[in-house]
Image: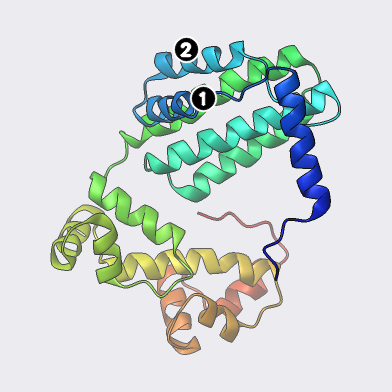
Amino acid sequence: MTNTIKPNMLERFMTVRMNNRQNHYLHPSFLMEQQLIEAITSQNKERAMNLLKNINKDQRPTLAHTPLRSLKNSLICSCTLFTRAIISAGVEAETAFNLSDAYILEIELRNTPERLDELEYEMLSHFIQMVIELEGLPYSTIINKAITFIHDHILDDLRLEQIAGHCYVSPSYLSHLFKKEVGRSIVQFINEKRVEESKYFLLHTTTSISDISGLFKFCNQSYYTSVFRKHLGLTPKQYRDTHASQPAAFS
C-alpha cells in the first residue's frame, strides 16, 4: 500500500483550498469547536447552543455540488462531533452511535434549509440530554466507566486487570466495588453481556454455535452452552430453533 496522495485527490484539495481563499472562507476555529465539545460534556446546554449559533453565523463550508446536499453534509459533520463528545463524557459508544445513526437518517429526510437548521439545534439538545441522563444511572462513575469499557470490548479477551487499568483503580478494588454495586461479579456480568450479544448471531446468521462461542471468547462450546442456559433457561440451539422465525429484542 502506498502513502502517495493520488493526483486527482491532490488536485481536488488544491481546488477547494483555492476556492476557499478566493471566497475568504475560513472553517470555524478549532478552539470554538473544542469549547463546544466541553460545553456538551459538562451538560451546559445554554453555552453549547450559543457556541453553535456563533459557529453558524459564519458561512458553512461547501461540502457538495448543491446547497441542500452541502448543508446536509455539514449537519452530518456536526452529528459526528456531538457523538464523539458524549462518548468522551461517558455515554456508551454503541448508544451514542445509534443516536447518531438515527439523526443522520432524519437529516436525509428533511429537504428545506429551515428544517435542517432547526434539526441541528434539536440534535445538540438531545445529545446533551444523553449526558445529563448519565447522572441518573444507578452506579458510580467508576462502575459506569467499567461497564462502558466492557460493552465496547465485548469481543475482546477481557481481563480484570485491563478493565481496572482503564478505570485507574486496582483490580481488587474494582472487583469489590462491582460486586457491591451491580450485585454480581465482573465475570458474571461479562458472560451475561456476551450471551445477550450472541443472540443476534444465533437468530440472524448461520454461524455455527461453536464459532459463535469462539467469537465471544468462551473457552469452549460446552461452557458457552452452560452459561447461556443458566442465563436464559435454554441452550443456544434451543434458542435458535425456538426464536429464529420471530423478531428478537436485544438488550
Q: Amino acid at mark 1?
A: Ser
How many angstroms separate mark 1 from mark 2 (CA)?
A: 15 Å
Whether residue 46 can be seen here: yes
- Looking at the image, which residue is at 55% across and 69% down? 198
Whether residue 62 can be seen here: no
Q: Which mark is residue 16?
A: none
Picture layout, residue 213 above or below residue 35: below
- Looking at the image, which residue is at 81% across and 44% down? 11
Q: Amino acid at mark 2?
A: Asn
Residue 163, quarter of the rendered image: bottom left
The residue lying toward the viewer, choosing from 124 and 219, is 124
Mark 2 lies on residue: 50
Residue 51 vs residue 203: left or right?
left
Q: Which mark is residue 29?
A: 1
Residue 168 locus on image (x, y percent): 21, 56
Mark 1 near mark 2, Cβ–Cβ under 8 Å?
no
